[in-house]
Image: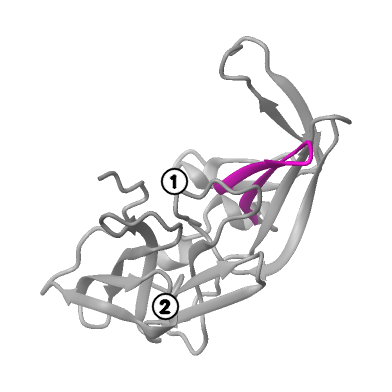
Amino acid sequence: GLGAAFFERLRFESSQPCRIAVVPKDALDAPRWFEVEFGAVYHYADAHERNGEIVISAARHDDPDEMRSPMAAAMRGEPGSNAMATELVWLRLDLASGRARWQASGIRGIEFPTFDQRHADSAPACLFAPTRIEPATAPYFNAIAAIDPVRERRRVHRYGSDILVEEHVFVPKPASRRVGEGWLVGTLLDARRGRGGIAVLDAEQVEDGPLAQAWLPYAMPLGFHGTFAA
């Protein structure tokens, strides 16, 4: 209805394909169009070109209705709300044939993927994304994952059952040149104790937990949802 929140008023026509425009930077008025099976995506991560294909990482929602307000339960403070019905996928655009397709990864329940933007290889980047590890009483996510799709490796730090975890931003270490060498900086909410926090982890040793973590005596707005710039 008209009184609903903005996202709850969205409607998706899942019987229609997605249309994708590939726009040359030197010819902004000449996009090339692709069509792919319907997929609902808010957030993309890295992209690369290899063997005539553009490959884009994305957190795809399986359920368009759930996507309209994926955090509604969390905003209502409902304990134990399920994780988002998402999957890490790759959108593959074949420049020669003009065909497009989704490639599944089997990695589910993530959102807000980030990566080291120095990554320039013709292969998927290591991604960092909030996820949910049971047992969990907090709604939404309660852990942060480092996902290396090339090595098929997934490392996770679980903050705890009561801690709501938001997007973690990658910050390169000073004078570092090696891709992946840096920190993850993310915001946290401990609703049980009414406080907000911030954590810093080694991006190459996520499973070891925070190098530093601080809590405020009150809750603060969650999420950076941006890019670090030196």
Kindly indicate the quadrant of the structure image that contains residue 37. top right
Badge 2 local density, few (<14 within 10 Å), some, or many (20+)? some
- Asked whether 54 falls inside the magenta stretch, the response is yes
Asked which quadrant contains residue 9, the reply is top right
Q: Compute the Cα span from label 2 to label 1.
A: 39 Å
Depth check: 135 or 177 in front?
177
* Res 75 quadrant in image: bottom left
Residue 77 is a magenta residue: no
Q: In front: 96, or 40?
A: 96
| Residue ID for mark 2 | 205
Single out the residue that lies furthest toward the bottom.
135
Of mark 2 and mark 1, the one earlier in the sequence is 1
User: In the displayed structure, does residue 160 sit left or right of residue 135?
Assistant: left
The prevailing secondary structure element of the residues shown in magenta is: strand
Which type of secondary structure does the marked residue at label 2 adopt? loop
Against 109, is 58 above or below? above
Q: Do the numbered discs 2 and 1 sit on residues whose CB atoms are within 8 Å?
A: no
Q: Does 165 appear above or below 18?
A: below
Q: Give the range drawn in magenta.
A: 42-60
Q: Residue at coordinates 65% horizontally, 71% vertically from top-left? A: 151
Residue 122 location, x and y as percent? Answer: 65, 47
Q: Which of marks 2 and 1 is in front?
A: 2
- The amino acid type of the residue labelled 2 equals Gln
The residue to which callout 1 is attached is 5
What label sits on residue 78 in the rendered view?
Answer: none
Question: Which residue sits at x=46%, y=41%?
Answer: 6
User: In x, y percent, where is residue 190?
Assistant: 27, 77
Pick the residue in front: 85 or 159: 159
Q: Residue shown at 35%/46% (left/top)?
A: 227
* Rendered residue at 31%/48% (across/down): 228
* Residue 148 visible to an observer of this rendering: yes
Asked if residue 79 can be seen in this view, the reply is: no
